[in-house]
Amino acid sequence: MSSWYTQCDNNDVIITSRIRLARNLSGVPFGTRLTDEQKKQINERVREAICDSNTPYAKTLKYIDMNDVPENECYAMMERHIISPEFAQNKENKAILISDDESICVMIGEEDHIRIQVLHSGLDLHKAYDIAERIDTFLGEKLNFAFSEKLGYLTECPTNLGTGLRASVMLHLPLLESTREISAIADSVSKIGFTVRGIYGESSESQASLYQLSNQITLGISEKDALKNLEAITTQIIDKELSLRETARGVALEDKVCRAYGILKNARIISSKEMMNLVSMIKLGVGMGIINIDNTLPMRILIECQPNMLMRKYGSLDAHERDVKRAQTIRTLLE
């Protein structure tokens, strides 16, 4: 089955909706206090709950011990947005349960004992949440999550107390970025309980004009209200980006898009940074109807031409060899 990013409709500003639910097992220390043996026991308890159950989850979610995953593949998973950077950086005694298309991933041993993640193309937070909630309910019945009537779900970091929900959308905002309005938006939304981050979330920078908008408040608000508020803010940002695109429409913008397309189709050596900038332009061109290509290609290029994704396909490569293979892969995709 194809990965989630091959199904993205790149005509839209929004790339994905993502839901993450943080959960911990009752009566077990938080992650920073766990022994190696306790980590292994949690992995096994979660594995048994899913894989030994008489449910569709036993067939649709595959258990992977991260100790068995090569380092390059681990970072390639991060580049595909399956696991978090923190999870990738230290994979010892961690595990995941993952669907064939990688849209569902249950991380075991991240900051909390369990992180249930669901990715969905486009703006569909409620559908992603419905899937995550069903998995959450099933695991909660099997594993007994740490919960307080006063505080809600108990989490390693106090900022996740309550619902334990981190809902986010990934947005392509080249015009808001070029006009520097994105900084003002980030300041404004931070005052009402939202945050704007880079392509890989917390502490990451924006690349290819991609930003993640997510909720910060998890205590004193229901999951449904949090999603409703995030959706409303997202819609406003999309409208601002589309308005700027119409204002910018003209031969100068067409020239930038077509030059970017020409370089990507013909380059023999291309760095990751240059690729990100150029693909952002052709993604903009696809959305505005300036160029006519398969609208899933921009995200495919952005994901499949990341450093570890290239080495996943071609084996160990130094920086120059990656730049050559990246250019070759892009040319092949755009043929």
Image (cartoon, rainbow, N blue to C red):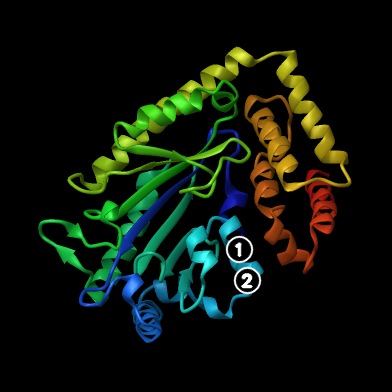
Residue at horizontal 49%, vertical 27%? 182
Is label 1 in a helix, a strand or a loop?
helix
Camera-side residue: 41 or 319? 319
Q: Judge left or right: residue 46 versus residue 320.
A: left
Is label 2 in a helix, a strand or a loop?
helix
Q: Is residue 61 visible?
A: no
Relative to 271, say whether 137 is above or below. below
Figure quadrant of residue 191 = top left
Q: Give the CA separation, mark 2 to mark 1.
A: 6 Å
Q: Judge left or right: residue 1 versus residue 159.
A: right
Camera-side residue: 209 or 284? 209
Relative to 220, say whether 237 is above or below. above
Disc number at residue 221? none
Q: Where does residue 157 sit, x and y in percent of width and height?
A: 30, 58
Q: Residues within 10 Å of mark 2 (few under 14, many from 20)?
A: some
The disc labelled 1 sits on which kind of residue? Tyr
* The residue positioned farthest toward the front in the image shown: 33
Q: Where does residue 331 sit, x and y in percent of width and height?
A: 83, 46
Q: Where does residue 128 sit, x and y in percent of width and height?
A: 39, 51
Asked whether disc 2 touches disc 1, contact meaning CB atoms under 8 Å apart, the reply is yes
Q: Is residue 161 visible?
A: yes
Residue indicated by mark 2:
71
Residue indicated by mark 1:
75
Q: Judge left or right: residue 239 versus residue 21.
A: right
The disc labelled 2 sits on which kind of residue? Glu
Camera-side residue: 293 or 109? 109
Relative to 229, say whether 297 is above or below. below
